[in-house]
């Protein structure tokens, strides 16, 4: 992950990546509306400093007005599609990162 410098270039690069990610996932064939909606929500909660967000699945479900199962299935689909990384820490909220499939070759 990039550290933010005095000019905010890392944050600017992240916001550009996030815009590309949103466009890419919107047009991605085979990605369900549910997965796109949850992915879009998560991506918009990410900031340029740490380039991720932290939420429990229960929090996401409550804030989106959806069931926890809806969120679990959507996140699993995003991970399986290779467009999201989820880091699970014991007794802490998950950390969500966007990933463009062509970022890592």
Image: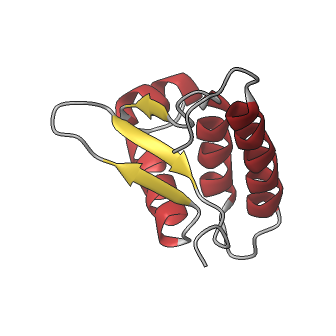
Of all residues, the one furthest to the front in this rendering is 6
- Side of 93 relative to 63 (left or right): left
- In percent of the image, x 83 and y 56: which residue is there? 23
- In percent of the image, x 23 and y 40: which residue is there? 89
Residue 52, x across and y down, in percent: 52, 37
Residue 36 sits above or below residue 96 on the image: below
* Quarter occupied by the C terminus: bottom right
Tell which of 26 and 71 is nearer to you: 26
Residue 71 sits above or below residue 54 on the image: below
Quadrant in the rendering for residue 76:
bottom left
Picture mark count? 0
Quadrant in the rendering for residue 26:
bottom right
- Side of 89 relative to 1 (left or right): left
Of all residues, the one furthest to the left in this rendering is 90
- In percent of the image, x 57 and y 41: which residue is there? 2
Residue 17 sits above or below residue 60 on the image: below
Residue 78, x across and y down, in percent: 54, 61
- Way the structure is coloured: secondary structure
Residue 95, x across and y down, in percent: 40, 39
Tell which of 34 and 3 is nearer to you: 3
């Amino acid at each position: 992950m990039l550290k933010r410098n005095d000019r905010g270039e890392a944050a600017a690069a992240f916001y550009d990546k996030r815009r590309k990610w949103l466009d890419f996932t919107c047009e991605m064939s085979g990605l369900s509306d549910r997965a796109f909606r949850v992915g879009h929500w998560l991506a918009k909660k990410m900031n340029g400093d740490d380039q991720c967000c932290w939420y429990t699945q229960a929090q996401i479900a409550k804030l989106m007005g959806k069931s926890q199962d809806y969120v679990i299935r959507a996140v699993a689909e995003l991970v399986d599609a290779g467009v999201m990384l989820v880091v699970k820490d014991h007794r802490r909220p998950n950390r969500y990162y966007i990933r463009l499939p062509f970022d890592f070759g």
